[in-house]
Image (cartoon, grey):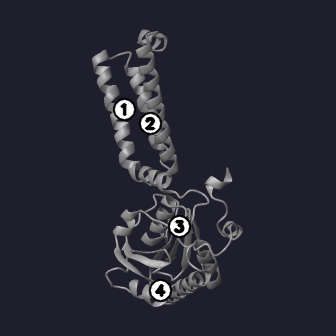
Amino acid sequence: MWAKVIEFFTDTNIPNIVAHVALIAVVTLVFFVLFYYAKKCNMQILVYLAMIAVVILFCLSFLLAPEVMRFFVYFTAGLICATGLVLFSQDFHRDIFRLSLRRSAGGESSFDEYGRDDLSESVAEIVKACLRLSKTDTGALIIVCDDLSDTILDSGTKVNAEISAELLETLFFPKTPLHDGAVIITDNKVMSAGCYLPLTQAHNLPREFGTRHRAAIGVSEAFPGLTAIVVSEETGIISAVHDGKIKRYLDANQLKAILECAMNLSDKGQEISIWGLREDEED
């Protein structure tokens, strides 16, 4: 066995060297990705189990025939990869979404083409709707964004209507077909309702957070530029989520300030004072 290990690292054949380097790179990448997502989901035990499996295989290599050993190596490697894909596929998909669809810094917003008066009126209508929904403990999830995946928009019903408190209250009225999904606001219009959003996989959230809160956090992790407004069906508490960060127990003035940031009615300093710096802006 030691002879095989020595041969692996001392082989001078160019194709073999390339193959060995590629093998080491792939194994390192797989373990790095597994460790990254396991740590992110508080499942580090999986990494330790994978390392124990590698150590056991190394020890067995001194006892088993090369053909048998090759089978165990391939089987274990495949099992580790399959487990990672099954457990962390949603997190991986979300991060790929985030990297590919994140708007470049300084890009134009879809709200920039509208006048301040129109946007301020829209903010007032959203605030009015949220306050009324809060008083009646009516659950709501409103997404305010410049752009969003067509997959999410198409998962609901197209509305393409002017923003009004009455419309929002109607869409979230209990037992109506669209009340459980999210309402998407972009281009200063209610574009779609009853939309399905990706849920966050975070395990350290407060117990009282239901599906709406988990969906708001999940979509804000995938699309850090958007702002999600949640009205709790159980307590009537109004919350806002942006880039995975959440603000709770909002009153009318706080909600108004957050929506003004979402619709580019305030400067960058105001946004930073509310949400702090994003991860990509801290570097």
Residue 45 — which label? none
Task: Report which residue position mark 2 lands on.
Answer: 30
Task: Report which residue position mark 4 lands on.
Answer: 137
Please state which amino acid type lies under the numbered disc 4.
Asp
Disc 2 or 1, which lies upstream in sequence?
Answer: 2
Real-space Cα distance between discs 4 and 1? 51 Å
Residue 263 on image: x %, y %:
58, 74
Disc 4 or 1, which lies upstream in sequence?
Answer: 1
Q: Identify the image quadrant of the N terminus.
A: top left
**Is disc 2 in contact with disc 4, using a CB cutoff of under 8 Å?**
no
- Residue 191 lies left or right of residue 206; in this view the side is left
Name the foreground residue: 46 vs 114.
Answer: 114
Residue placed at 61% from the left, 60% from the top? 106
- Other residues around mark 1 within 10 Å, as few (<14) / some (14–19) / many (≥20): some
- Work out which residue is located at the far front of the displayed protein and give it: 113
Please state which amino acid type lies under the numbered disc 1.
Ala
- Other residues around mark 2 within 10 Å, as few (<14) / some (14–19) / many (≥20): some
